[in-house]
Image (cartoon, grey):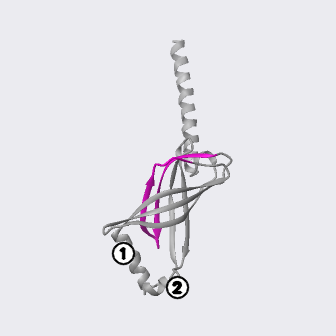
Amino acid sequence: MAAGVWGLSAGRRMIGRLGFLCSVLLVAGCAGTPFGSEPLYVTLSSLSVVEPGLLEQRYAMRLRVQNPNPAEIQVSGLSFEIELNDQTFARGVSNRPTTIPAFGEALLDVEAVSTLEGLLRQVLEMQENPERAIRYRLRGKLYGGGSPIPFPFDHSGEFRLPPALRERAS
């Protein structure tokens, strides 16, 4: 009988410890970055058309990733999406491993794909109002860093077409 009581008490302690561990992992997951690290700053450094197909277009992109943390991050892959004027424009993934140094940065070469619908929607909007600023948003997740929790990123801004392109759009 004493062994049965001891087993019950040990079981309760184990459940309590598992509950505590789950709470810690949940709080870390809700924080948005793995275990209290600072968010990474990811921006689009360059973009060029690789394959201008009829139904889809492929782009070569270079992403600049800045790591404001005191430890390097081993990236095993990433997924991302680019929005223009609050509409999805292109999506991409990469499984190329890289290392982002502590308090440093790295350039990641990736590819993205847009659809004919997304491209036409943007062209039509630019033709309607070529003077309007174009809002963009780059968001996604970097995987790795020894954590099962991805590093999310989200960067937005706006730009205007150069005058020569504005004249062509109108």
Magenta residues, dominant SS class: strand
Front residue (pair 115, 86) = 115
- Per the image, label 1 sits on a secondary structure element best described as helix
Q: Which mark is residue 120?
A: 1
116 vs 139: above or below: below
Q: Residue furthest left?
A: 55
Q: Which mark is residue 62?
A: none
Residue identifier under label 2: 163
- Per the image, label 2 sits on a secondary structure element best described as helix
Span colored in magenta = 72-98
Q: Is 30 in the magenta? A: no
The first of marks 2 and 1 along the sequence is 1
Front residue (pair 63, 11) = 63
Seen at 51% across and 73% down, the residue is 135
Circle 1 packing at 10 Å, graded few (<14), some (14-19), many (20+), is: few
Seen at 48% across and 82% down, the residue is 165
Residue 30 x, y percent position in the rendering: 55, 50
Circle 2 packing at 10 Å, graded few (<14), some (14-19), many (20+), is: few
2 vs 1, front mark: 2
> What kind of residue is marked 2?
Pro
131 vs 121: above or below: below
> What kind of residue is marked 1?
Leu
